[in-house]
Amino acid sequence: MEKIDWNKLSFGYQKTNYNTRCYYRDNKWGEIEVTGSEIINMHISATCLHYGQEAFEGLKAFRGKDGRIRVFRWDENAKRLNTSADGIRMANVPQKLFKEMVWKTISLNSEFVPPYGTGAALYIRPLLLGTGAEIGVKPASEYLFMIFVTPVGPYFKEGLKPVNMMISRDYDRAAPLGTGNIKVGGNYAGSLNAIQNAHDQNFTNVVFLDAKEKKYIDECGPANFFAIKDNTYITPKSKSILPSITNKSLITLAEDMGLKVERRKVPVEELGTFEEAGACGTAAVISPIGTIYDPAAKKTYSYYENEPGPVSMELYSRLTSIQLGDTEDKYGWVEFVD
C-alpha cells in the first residue's frame, strides 16, 4: 500500500485490497466470494445494462480516538437497499448477509480506514445488480450483490464552508410516482445535466423543485435539503425524495436539542424566511448553504455566507462526535468492527 496523505483525500475512488461478492441464483443466495479484482464479468444482455435493474447504498466506517473501527447505522442502509430492490423488482439481500459482507470487506481493508482526526473516513459502497440475461423487459433471475470500500475525504472540497446553489426549473430529478424515493442509478444520471449547468454558472450544486408543480423544494443535487427558522428544523416531505439516513439522524438530534421538527412541503418563497439552510447526506454529512439563486425570479436568498450557522454547526458536531466515538452513542447507531 502506498503512503496516503489522509488530510488531502478527495471524495473519489482509490483502489483497496479486496471486495466481496455474492450471487443470487436458483432463488437463493450463494457463498460470499472475496476478490482483488476491480472488474465485473457479466452477460451482454444483463438487465442492469439494459433496463436499469441496479441499486446501491453508501455508508461509512470511522476510526475513533481509541483506534476502534465504527460503522454508522448500517442496518438502515440494509433496509433501504431492499426498499430499492422492491421498487425495481430485484431479489432482496438478507440483512445478515449484508452485515457479514460489510464487516468482512472492512476487515480485509482495515489499513485503509483513515486515522482519527484527519476528517477522512472509509466509504462503503454496496451494489446490487441484475446480471441475468434478458432481452425482453422483465426482471432478471440472477443478481450480484457486491461491496467495495475506498478511503475518502469530504464530499464538498469546501468542507464545512457554506456553498452557493441555484434552483433548477429546466430539469426534473424524478417523477412524483417514479423512483425518486429509492436509491437507483437512474435518478443520479437524470440529475447530471442540471448539476453540470449549475457548475457552468459557478454554483456548487443545484436545488431541484417538485416535478409536478415546480412550487416546492425537492432535493439538493444528491442530498436532502433542510432549513432552520424559529427554533424549528424543516425538511421537505415528498414521495420523490430519497429518505436520507443522515437527515433521519439529524431530526433525532434536533429534537434532543429542543428544536421542533417539521417534515412538510417547503414552498420556494419560504427560502427568504429561513435563518439557515443546508444539504445533508452520507457523503456530505452536512453542507451549509450560503446562498440560493433563483434564475426565474432573478433573486438570491442569503444565509450564513462565510461560516456555518450555529444550529447547523451544532448538529454537525453532535453527529460526527457520535460517529467518531467522541461522545456517548445513546441511540445505538454505531457498531464496532473489531
Image (cartoon, helix red, strand yellow):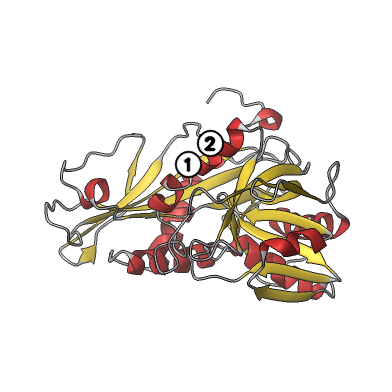
Q: Residue at x 86, y 41 (%)?
A: 306
Circle 1 — which element? helix
**From this viewpoint, which residue is outermost toward the front?**
297
* Depth check, front residue: 41 or 20: 41
Q: Which residue is mark 2?
A: 196
Q: Residue at x 81, y 57 (%)?
A: 276
Q: Residue at x 28, y 39 (%)?
A: 40
Badge 1 density bin: few <14, some 14–19, many ≥20, Cα 10 Å: some
Task: Pinpoint residue 334: horizontal percent, then vertical percent.
Answer: 64, 63
Q: Is residue 30 left or right of residue 178?
A: left
* Depth check, front residue: 331 or 313: 313
The three-letter code of the residue at mark 1 reads Leu
Q: Is residue 19 left or right of residue 307?
A: left
The three-letter code of the residue at mark 2 reads Gln
Q: Which residue is mark 1?
A: 192
* Depth check, front residue: 336 or 211: 211
Residues marked 1 and 2 touching at CB (< 8 Å):
yes
Task: Pinpoint residue 131: horizontal percent, then vertical percent.
Answer: 22, 51
* Depth check, front residue: 10 or 31: 10
Circle 2 — which element? helix
Count of labels in the image: 2
Say whether residue 111 is visible: no
Q: Residue at x 38, y 63 (%)?
A: 97
